[in-house]
Amino acid sequence: MSHLKQLSELGLFDARVPRYTSYPTAPQFSSDLSGELFARWVQQIQPGSAISLYLHVPFCRRLCWFCACRTQGTSTDAPVLAYAESLRVELEAFRRILPEGVRLSRLHWGGGTPTMLPPESMRALAAQVFDIAPLAEGGEFSVEIDPNEVDDERLDALAEAGLTRASIGVQDFDPEIQGIIGRDQSFEITKSTADAIRARGIKSLNADILYGLPNQTQRRMADSVQKLMSLNPDRIALYGYAHVPWMARRQQMIPSDTLPRPEERLELFETARRLLLWDGYDEIGIDHFARPHDGLSKAAREGKLRRNFQGYTDDTSPVLVGLGASSISRFPQGFAQNAPATAAWKKFVEAGEFATTRGHAFTPADIWRARAIEVLMCDFRLSRSELIETFGADAATLDELMDHTAQRFGQFVKRTAESLEITLEGRPLTRMIATMFDEYAMDKAGHSSAV
């Protein structure tokens, strides 16, 4: 039986499984959490410790049809400026409850398009953040940059504010594909932006590219990847396009019959993967690649790779605070999400309240199951003793899950008394295998409801 047929029979091409940037995943969040609990969790942060901070800017000049992020389009700067002022109010409220001496291991501005902010707003926002909590030694300040929505003045402002890592969305360089997905962004403007970033001394560059887009072929995939490699980004995220028009209405603009079949998606991924490995990138987890000198690659080699809402990371801070509409925070105690709608979030902020409306408080089982899923996603291997001794796993339950996984996935996993390891051939199944440890995705018969 061919490798592809075996993967197909296990349900790879039919399964809808989470990306596991969190556990439990966001659909499991409830409305039981409030801003009062968010504040209490912030106040319980260890004084003098390092945390991560994420600021969300949910605006775009144009809405790309492929995107399923929570963003809104605007042709004027007025709503962006008003939002930035509200974000500064939220930051000030955060300052008042943050324990003394806290520093930032990571600061990330995401969106949407953070580079829609005018230069003076960028400077003011960064100054306020670093007045609240400066970067820790070795800390990083990163921003998502849209080459179509950035100029020299904005790049100057970010560089002066201390930007250390820039992230550029590429998706695909083929003009026909760009037209279908509503994302016109030439290679020339992307290269010009990358050059301008590096000219300002910002040495670290990330880039995102998608496979599984409409009318994408192996030849077109290879061409886009080769153009991207010519920019020499330090990290590349190779994400699979998720076509969910019932959730993201703008995706209805993309004809479903132009999308590659599931088997073709895997071939597109493999085409890109082979090129990136040939060019000297290290493979990180299921969908990232990094130069050997990059912190992500070092973390993978040292077994310190982690996973959060931005994907793979080398940040080991136990706390990630998200501010802005729809942002999600992670604390040792659980997750807290702000009101998704900008108007609702702003109403909370203007009333002097924190905008948490959803979340999840961890159970003891959540802790060890989250770690099991994370190490499978990061290292393709879990340690029975670590999960029991460090994370409090119930030995009998863990053994049953490991046995069940080994039986279901056969040759694609290796089960020993101490570990469960995903083989190289089985890595396309990683998210499905991780689902076996997801208590919320299992039915009463013990089978994943997502498979």
Image (cartoon, rainbow, N blue to C red):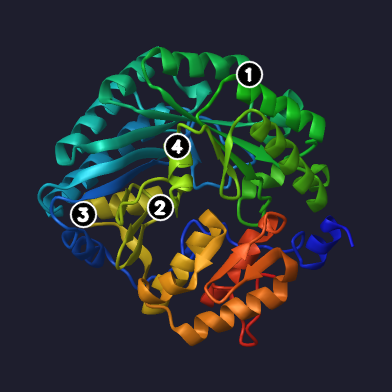
Mark 2 neighbour density, 10 Å: few (under 14) some (14–19) many (20 or more): many
**Residue farthest to the left, as pictured:** 100
Which residue corresponds to the image point at 49% horizontal and 43% vertical from the top-left? 71
Mark 3 neighbour density, 10 Å: few (under 14) some (14–19) many (20 or more): few
Q: Would you name the residue on which mark 1 appears?
A: 187
Q: Quadrant of residue 385?
A: bottom left
Q: Are marks 3 and 1 in contact (CB under 8 Å)?
A: no
Instruction: Mark 4 or mark 1: name the one nearer the start of the chain.
Output: 4
Q: Are marks 2 and 3 in contact (CB under 8 Å)?
A: no
Asked whether residue 415 appears in the rendered view, the answer is: yes
Instruction: Mark 2 or mark 1: name the one nearer the start of the chain.
Output: 1
Instruction: Mark 4 or mark 2: name the one nearer the start of the chain.
Output: 4
Label 1 element class:
helix
Q: Would you name the residue on which mark 4 appears?
A: 59
Q: Amino acid at mark 1?
A: Phe
Q: Is residue 321 above or below residue 360?
A: above
